[in-house]
């Protein structure tokens, strides 16, 4: 059996020269790769008491929903601004070239709920930092953050200091 990292396609010089793009779609396209990813995320949550799984669009949905399903937990989507139909709370965060806003329904997290965040990738950590702020604003407690891949060279984990963070694959570069 192959290891999870063997299912990741690496594309050199994308989106710009010197960058190696780590393509998660090659994990999704292979049944065994997808099973390894979901099983790995579930294993990283073993022994972690949590009430709900939160994931950002779109790849956080792809990985977070099967985790929530398997654990019989609810799933809370975090979306780009203007995509959720009910009353929301918002958080702005910085991107490499600008900023963005993520939103969550105002009633999605109940005070005191323990939250696990699941996403495909941690790069600079900005999106996850914004999600943490949303969860905490609603009175939730982030008890674990799980990623399929981590680009350690971008130091996103530093923004998440003080939180229990796990990644299935770590790439030292950017």
Image (cartoon, grey):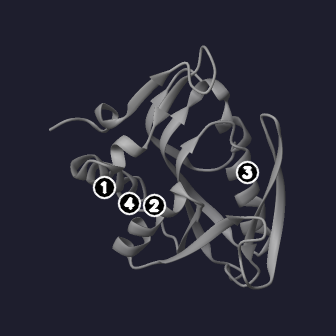
Q: Nearer the viewer, mark 3 or mark 2?
A: 2
Q: Marks 3/2: CA distance?
A: 20 Å
Give me the residue at 77% from left, 75% from top: 138
Say if 5 sits above or below 107 in the image.
above
Q: Which residue is mark 1?
A: 39
Left of 80 or right of it: where is 57? left
Q: Nearer the viewer, mark 1 or mark 2?
A: 2
Q: Give the quarter of the image for residue 169.
A: top left
- Along the line of sight, which residue is nearer the eye, 99 or 114? 99
Earlier residue among tags 3 and 2: 2
- Along the line of sight, which residue is nearer the eye, 11 or 33? 11
* Residue 7 location (% of width, % of height): 31, 37
Q: Nearer the viewer, mark 2 or mark 4?
A: 2
Q: Which residue is mark 3?
A: 129
* Residue 39 location (% of width, % of height): 30, 55
Which of the labelled discs sits on residue 46, or is there none? 4
Give me the residue at 58% from left, 50% from top: 164
Q: Give the quarter of the image for residue 82.
A: bottom right
Q: Marks 3/1: CA distance?
A: 25 Å
Q: Secondary structure at mark 1?
A: helix
- Asked if marks 4 and 3 touch (Cβ < 8 Å), the reply is no
Q: Marks 4/3: CA distance?
A: 23 Å
Q: Is residue 136 visible?
A: yes
In the image as oriented, which residue stretches furthest toward the left? 1
């Amino acid at each position: 059996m192959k290891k999870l990292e063997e299912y990741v396609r690496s594309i050199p010089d994308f989106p710009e020269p010197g960058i190696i793009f780590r393509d998660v779609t090659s994990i999704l396209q292979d049944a065994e790769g997808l099973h390894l990813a979901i099983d790995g995320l579930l294993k990283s949550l073993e022994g972690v008491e949590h009430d709900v799984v939160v994931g950002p669009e779109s790849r956080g949905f792809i990985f977070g929903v099967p985790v929530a399903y398997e654990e019989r937990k609810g799933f809370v989507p975090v979306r780009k601004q203007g995509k959720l139909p009910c009353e929301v709370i918002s958080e702005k965060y910085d991107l490499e070239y600008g900023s963005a806003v993520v939103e969550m329904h105002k009633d999605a997290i109940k005070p005191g709920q323990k939250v696990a965040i699941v996403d495909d990738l941690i790069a600079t950590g900005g999106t996850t930092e914004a999600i943490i702020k949303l969860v905490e604003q609603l009175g939730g407690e982030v008890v674990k953050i799980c990623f399929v891949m981590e680009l350690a060279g971008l130091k996103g984990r530093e923004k998440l200091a003080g939180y229990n963070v796990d990644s299935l694959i770590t790439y030292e570069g950017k």
